[in-house]
Image (tube, rainbow, N blue to C red):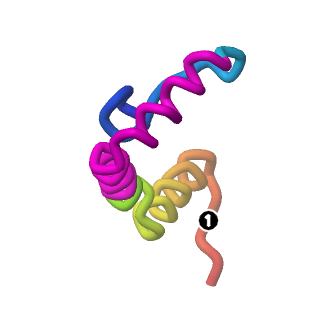
Amino acid sequence: MINDGENGFLVSPLDADRIADVIATWQGNRADLARAKKKARQYAERHFDWKQMMDAYADVFREFGAKPIG
């Protein structure tokens, strides 16, 4: 999930001026860009861990009556 201004920016794909502003902002402040990148990676590592995702898929399959293989 993107928290606007914290680990990314939420921008309409059709808003070219806003996209340009965001790019210019990060070009002008590499320290903020580095912080946002770090926060985005930390979020992804916490919420999209391989085992956690596989456990969630298994829960969905079990919910629909699938039985384990083996």
Q: Quadrant of residue 12?
A: top right
- Classified by dominant secondary structure, the portion drawn in magenta counts as helix
Amino acid beneath label 1: Lys
Residue 35 at x, y percent in the picture? 28, 50
Q: Closest to the observer: 22 or 1? A: 22
Q: Closest to the observer: 43 or 61? A: 43
Is residue 35 in the magenta section?
yes
Secondary structure category for the residue under label 1 = loop
Residue 6 at x, y percent in the picture? 30, 35
Residue at x 59% of width, y 71% of height? 68
Is residue 13 in the magenta section?
no
Image: 27 above or below 68: above
Region rendered in magenta: 16-43
Image: 66 above or below 12: below
Q: Closest to the observer: 1 or 5? A: 5
Residue 63 at x, y percent in the picture? 54, 46
Residue 16 at x, y percent in the picture? 67, 19
Residue at x 53% of width, y 60% of height? 58
Residue extending furthest toward the bottom: 70
Residue extending furthest toward the front: 28
Density class for disc 1 (Cα within 10 Å; few <14, some 14-19, many ≥20) is few
Q: In which quadrant of the rendered image does the C terminus lie? A: bottom right
Q: Quadrant of residue 51?
A: bottom left
Image: 9 above or below 7: above
Q: Closest to the observer: 35 or 44? A: 35
Residue identified by numbered label 1: 67
Residue at x 39% of width, y 39% of height? 28
User: In the rendered view, does 63 fall on the left or right side of 39?
Assistant: right
Q: Give the mark count.
A: 1
Q: Quadrant of residue 67?
A: bottom right
User: In the rendered view, does 52 fall on the left or right side of 38?
Assistant: right
Q: In which quadrant of the rendered image does the N terminus lie? A: top left
